[in-house]
Image: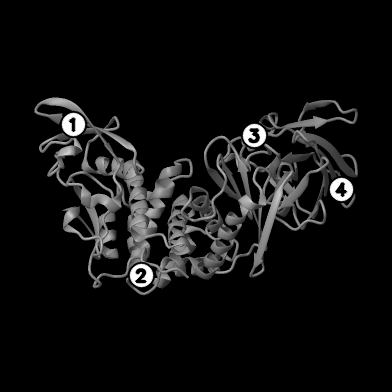
Amino acid sequence: MTLEVNVQSSGRLLVRHHLPLAWVERALPDLCFAFDTVEFENGPNGYQRFIRSVAEDGSESAFAACHPSAEADLDTTYAMLPEHEAAHAIHGLEDAPHTLSRGLFLIGRAFVPSVSFDGAHVLDMPVDVTFHLPEGWTLIASHPLDGTTLHADSVREAQEVVFELGRLSVIEQSASETRLRVVSGDYSEEDLRPLLDLGMRTLRLARQLLGPLHSREVLATFDRAPLGLSGGRIGDAVSLLSDRPPRGTALSPSGRVLVHELIHLWNTARDAPWLHEGMTRYLELMLRVRLDELPEPVALSQLMRIYDRYRRDAGARRITDATLSMDGWAYAAGAVLAFCVDTELRSEDTDLFAVLRDARSRVGIGQPLDDASFFDALTEASPETARRARAWLEHQGVIDFGACLTRAGYVLRGVTYRDITPEGESTVLRASVNVVWPPTVGRPRASSGFTRGDRLISVNGERLVSLHDLGWALRSASLGDRLRFRVRRAGRSRVVVQRSPDLDHFARRGLRYVAVMREGATRPPSPLRVSAP
């Protein structure tokens, strides 16, 4: 099978598709095309948004999905109409070609069709795809190219390749037989250099912890889009879109997303979102601790925010009910489970990374994980931990995360910060203003705006039903954010405006907080206590 792809500067593709059929020695039923993407999955009617059939005279009509196969060979021409700039930035990376400010981003399955007899018997064969580019454009792919031609051994292989086309900045670095290329049409090589360095450090560390990587070529694209920060992993490529230049630290937003998406090269399990996204979220946090020596208080604070999201959204559901359509909850539920499992394993002198290495070896390097393989590896490492993990997965409602923290060497209790010295072994996190319900403020400074006995009603308009709501509101605020507390004082409603406090300066405040404190060395080692490599 061969495809000649003519690319217009607007991003429109004109594809000439040649399918040799002379080797078939019988009359054929109709041959039908299918594009294996989310947007196209509804059949021929779903194609109309992106694909048009092109006749020999250049006229266009509705795309014809099926073709009579009386001829020895089948030659078809179709036009691909890309989406607007950065369309569907997170999930749409896989759906259809879309234009960016300097070119085009597309994945092979958006324009390389599967071909079958009557939609039943799928043909597979080697595929050559040749691109014809506008003047000044460059082609970069997540697969080795022969100039501007891709040679793939199968249709599926061609469909999994990610392409960047346009006026590009490209930098690359190789280590341990893997080459990482960072590409952008919006930022300079100097802008991209820190991101390349972070990507290489992430690949090296993840290889040590999770085992070998099947990919020889890893492509990371970073482009401008006016919608904040988003990212996705497709095949052996990582795509990031942001309205700000990249920063090459695992503590930065762009760095966090890059680390997360690169870990998906090892940890992907589409049929188990808690394992695919949630556990990857936890692994990302662990690698960021090691990559940039993320302080334990900050790492634990982020984990507590993840737990807040999980608790808020879980309701009476089970972790196994999490789906990728419930995006935030899938991340949070799996990350909470991963922390609890890792804590149990570390008390037995192993860890989650070792279990995942074993699980990957069971399914084969580069193959998607499944929960059966994960639990086989977990049972091999610790039957009791596997039993607990299954119970957590099937438990309706919120699992006891406080018990996992205690097992990891922490204890939750109310304290006043002035009773703790910064030089001590304790760690205090931003949390709630009180430790009993109904909440009242105790021992405030005169300038704080609170008065002893104030009853808290809401924070920033969100009504407080329990202490968990208050803790979530305060941990979700960034340093310096203005917080509007509505309180009831002497029978009347009042508003008290405070700024979110800096953890390092809690000692200067007279308020009470819920703290997460480090206990003595008799506890099992915390998963968050890791040293830089």
Mark closer to the chain start, 2 or 1: 2
Label pair 2/1, CB-CB below 8 angstroms = no
Please, what secondary structure does the residue beneath circle 2 have? helix
Mark 3 vs mark 4, CA separation in Å:
38 Å
Please, what secondary structure does the residue beneath circle 1 have? strand
Task: Name the residue carrying label 4.
Answer: 21
Q: Amino acid at mark 2?
A: Arg
The image shows residue 513 at horizontal and vertical percentages of 20, 48
Please, what secondary structure does the residue beneath circle 4 have? loop
- 300 on left or right of 463: right
> Tag 2: Cα neighbours inside 10 Å, few (<14), some, or many (≥20)?
some
Image point (29%, 29%), residue name: 461
Task: Name the residue carrying label 2.
Answer: 346
Task: Name the residue carrying label 1.
Answer: 487
Label pair 2/3, CB-CB below 8 angstroms = no
Mark 3 vs mark 1, CA separation in Å:
46 Å
Can you tell which of label 1 and label 4 is closer to the viewer? 1
Mark closer to the chain start, 3 or 4: 4
